[in-house]
């Protein structure tokens, strides 16, 4: 990956929250046919994090030429468990290593914060992301079939033990 083509930052600025929500809504609607409820699913907890910041939580924004290219976050769930959330790389930037970079940064941060585990929820339709998780050491821990965003799918919980 040519990291020089991208910049990662974790200081949110006005417009970032809207971009994360909008891009999640638009990309998942276009690619997976998710309905408007998915955008609300992203917006609620993200707004909570911005309104009540946690020093052990962090959001990364990936940009190229000052244009949003992707995002990811580590959010404190408990003193020992973090959630990996809001992981998205826009379609035009996929296959360039940006997703791997975001995941690596997030996991390094989780380790620095002394979390013992990192968990995440995804859906079975996102096979490329699941491959990244498994390669990073996550294991599939739970599955729930349903249609929470208007499309039949299986939600999947992955867990990574950071203690080895």
Image (spheres, rainbow, N blue to C red):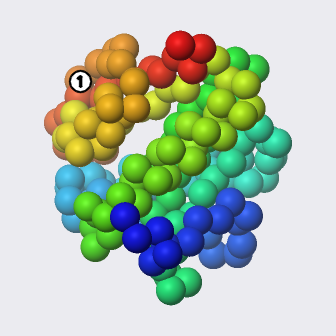
The residue drawn where x is 28% and y is 73% is 92
Query: In the rendering, at what x and y percent does residue 57 appear?
Result: 71, 42
Location of the N terminus by quadrant is bottom left
User: Can you say whether 110 is above or below 47 in the image?
Assistant: above
Query: Which is nearer the eye, 28 or 99?
Result: 99
Query: Which is nearer the eye, 140 or 3?
Result: 3
Mark 1 lies on a secondary structure that is: strand
Quarter-of-image position of residue 126: top left
Quarter-of-image position of residue 111: top right
Answer left or right for 53 relative to 19. Answer: right
The residue drawn where x is 40% and y is 70% is 2
Please say whether residue 27 is visible from this viewpoint. no
Crowding at label 1, few (<14), some or many (≥20) Cα neighbours within 10 Å? few
Query: In the rendering, at what x and y percent does residue 131 appear?
Result: 26, 37
Please say whether residue 131 is visible from this viewpoint. yes
Q: Which residue is mark 1?
A: 145
Quarter-of-image position of residue 29: bottom left
User: Can you say whether 98 is above or below 53 in the image?
Assistant: below
């Amino acid at each position: 990956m040519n990291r020089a083509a991208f910049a990662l930052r974790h200081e949110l600025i006005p417009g970032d929250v809207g971009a994360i929500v909008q891009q999640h809504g638009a990309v998942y609607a276009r690619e997976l046919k998710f309905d408007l409820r998915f955008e609300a699913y992203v917006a609620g907890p993200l707004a909570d994090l911005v309104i009540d910041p946690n020093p052990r939580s962090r959001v990364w924004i990936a940009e190229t030429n000052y244009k949003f290219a992707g995002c990811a976050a580590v959010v404190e769930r408990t003193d020992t468990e973090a959630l990996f959330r809001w992981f998205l790389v826009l379609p035009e930037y996929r296959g360039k290593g940006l997703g791997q970079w975001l995941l690596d940064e997030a996991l390094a941060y989780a380790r620095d914060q002394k979390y013992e585990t990192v968990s995440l929820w995804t859906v079975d339709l996102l096979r490329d992301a699941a491959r990244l998780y498994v390669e990073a050491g996550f294991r599939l821990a739970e599955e729930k079939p349903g249609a929470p965003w208007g499309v039949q799918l299986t939600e999947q919980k992955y867990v990574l033990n950071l203690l080895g």
